[in-house]
Amino acid sequence: MKNFYIKPKIEFGENSLNFLKNNVNGKVFIVTDKSMVTLKLVDKITELLPKNSLVKIFDEVTPNPTTDVVEKGLKELVLFNPDVVIALGGGSPIDACKGMLYFGRKLKITLNNKLFIAIPTTSGTGSEVTSYSVITEGNKKIALANEEMLPDIAILNPEFMKTLPKKIIADTGMDVFTHALEAYVSKVANPFTDAMALESLKLLNKNLVKHYNNAQDLEPRKNVQFASCLAGVAFNNSSLGINHSIAHTIGAKFHLSHGRANAILLPYIIKINENANERYEVLAKELNLEGKKSFVKYIENLKVTLGIEKSLSELNIDFQEFQNLIPEMLSEIKADICTEFNPNILTDEEYIKLLLKIYFGNL
């Protein structure tokens, strides 16, 4: 049986936070990070809650949230026993919050009937509309998937993206690009996911560089946010591929942001996914490009514009360390939940050659 799953109700636009005024009651547990508190972005949430609301803020989420952070947050969540759970921030706070709910239910802790609201402050992961969460344990990233992690409400407010640094806009924007692209070429892509992935790519094509050059410009900012959400819905229903599998392991081992890891990998993955050539040709045509080769060149040029490296060696990652970790990385890539849906199935030898190309920049 095939299905297309849509759950979160999406509130969007400049006034979308007003949803909180009349729809949130009782005890509210907010999962976020310290920067959201320092920048007073949490205040934008709390000031809209009813005056009689009892609020607890868990702000200890770190980039690439760990199992320790999730465990600590879960303990506080259970003790507080809120009526509403709000995840505020980039992918890390939202993923951490999902992890708390996931492991809480897995441990049979009573977490039912809690309204779960996700409010992204970057346009990248699409986590506000997906059933996925990525949690770090040691030097490994664990990708979780469970429909119970889908938020009930997603609030897309473009005001949060006005002051993002260029590097974050670049990294998160290319994460969106990778989501849409892998959703489109997935083994289980379907007309529903195709429509959303394609629209996401079109929006990015017209708006990502504009957003990167001027985050104050509202229209590009809104459109990149829409692209992120559309790509999230798409890959939540079609999964991803080895671009993400490899990015998960490389990001965890070399402390590289997820979006940047995805961006570095993209041209290499497209070249090796020969079973998806026809789909890449369609995408190239939709972006007014001549074919797959020009599509790869387009991505390479986009990376240059966004200040993203061509290879891992450009990040000064030690080759000996990288080489020594290849067996471990290979094992993790093959075990990753995204690998199953990649257009091409790679042998160990092909994976090793691919990893070396990515390190040295040999396209």
Image: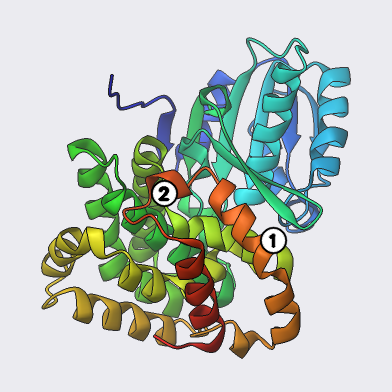
Amino acid type, mark 2: Leu
Quadrant of image for the C terminus? bottom left
- Residue at the location (52% across, 42% down)? 337
Question: Which residue is labeled 1 in the image?
Answer: 328
Return the residue nearer the eye: 75 or 23.
75
How far apart in space, not on screen, are marks 2 and 1 (Cα)? 21 Å
Q: Quadrant of residue 31?
A: top right
Q: Quadrant of residue 166?
A: bottom right
Question: Which residue is labeled 2 in the image?
Answer: 240
Return the residue nearer the eye: 230 or 320.
320
Q: Give residue 324's position: percent from left, percent from top.
A: 73, 74
Quadrant of image for the N terminus? top left
Question: Marks 2 and 1: which is nearer the front?
Answer: 1
Return the residue nearer the eye: 245 or 221.
245
- Residue at the location (27% across, 69% down)? 205
The vertical placement of 156 against 56, above or below, is below
Q: Give residue 103's position: percent from left, percent from top.
A: 73, 26
- Residue at the location (17% across, 39% down)? 191
How dense is the environment of label 1, judged by Cα within 10 Å: few (below 14), some, or many (20 and up)? few
Q: Give residue 112's position: percent from left, percent from top.
A: 66, 11
Amino acid type, mark 1: Glu
How dense is the environment of label 2, judged by Cα within 10 Å: few (below 14), some, or many (20 and up)? many
Q: Is residue 46 left or right of residue 71?
A: left
